[in-house]
Amino acid sequence: MKSEIIGRGRTALIYAWDDGQVLKLYEPGTSKSKVEHEIELGQRIQARGIPSPAVEGFIEVDGQPGIIFERVDGPTMLEYSAAKPWQVFWIARRFAELQAEMHTSLVPGLPDLNKKIRARLDAITLLTPETKAELIALLESYPASNAVCHGDFHPGNLIMSPRGPIIIDWLDVARGYPLYDVARTSYLLSKAAMPPGASPAQRLFIRLFRKLFHWLYLRRYRQIWYFTTQELKDWYRLVAAARLSEGIAEEEAQLLAIVKG
């Protein structure tokens, strides 16, 4: 049964469960189909050998849907960084390398990223039809790709386990052009609101080191998989537009400014 909270995100809490397991319990009102979709995605990712927790199955606790996962012990990369800020150069480089390695993977059956972006654009009321059409044209100007894109790749979603870094929270995974993933990570590192539940040490690390970490990350990723500044700007606009659908009020103004270019 659930005991202490050991992690938290914007839509779910993580509880210690039975030996070797954790419970990811979603907020009330989350649909069962959404949770079952994450289970299926997690199993597909695991089957391809991408470093991720084993998925044990669906559970309902007090009327709320959840997932039982293998427990992966260790601090998140954000916690590790806050405890050892002098290692920021190595950590940021390794972070970029892990994402680039993931982007070389192919996993059959993942959702199509372009379709997800279009669906999010359709749902946004803050953008004019002309802006939406411009963004869709920009999206379609890039070649099709089947790279594994995590969709929320940031240091809080990597656990520094004894067997190496493990990537968690695969709800938004899709197959698509990898620069979308890079641009979203770039935004999260440089401009996103503080993560919920961040400790004072983590907040201090973010305030002091986010610019350096971001610069090191982009430099290392570009060494592995080259992209131009304009290409990153294009995908940055698409990422900002898609993030508007998440309803994060404190980011709305800056997201709209990014979309406008």
Image (cartoon, grey):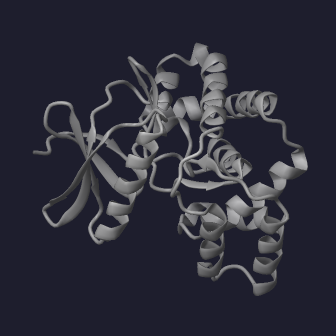
Q: Position of residue 85 (x, y in %)?
A: 57, 18
Q: Is residue 36 left or right of residue 82?
A: left
Question: On screen, 183 above or below 199?
Answer: below
Choose top left, top right, bottom left or bottom right for residue 234: bottom right
Point 63% across, 80% down: residue: 122
> In the displayed structure, would residue 115 be above or below residue 68?
below
- Position of 183 with respect to 195 (left or right) is right
Q: Residue at x 77, y 73 (%)?
A: 136
The image shows residue 24 at horizontal and vertical percentages of: 28, 49
Quarter of the picture containing the N terminus is top left
Q: Is residue 227 above or below residue 250?
A: above
Please indicate whether residue 137 sits to the left or right of residue 66 in the image. Answer: right
- Quarter of the rendering occupied by the C terminus: bottom right
Residue 254 in sight in this render: no
Residue 254 is situated, as x and y percent measured from the top left of the image, at: 71, 61
Q: Is 87 placed above or below 1 here?
A: above
Taking the image as drawn, is residue 16 in sight? yes
Residue occupying image coordinates x 67% and y 23%? 93
> Where is residue 115 shown, x and y percent of the image?
63, 70
Residue 212 vs residue 122, the one in the foreground: 122
Q: Residue furthest top?
A: 86
**Quarter-of-image position of residue 34:** bottom left
Number of numbered tags placed on the structure image? 0
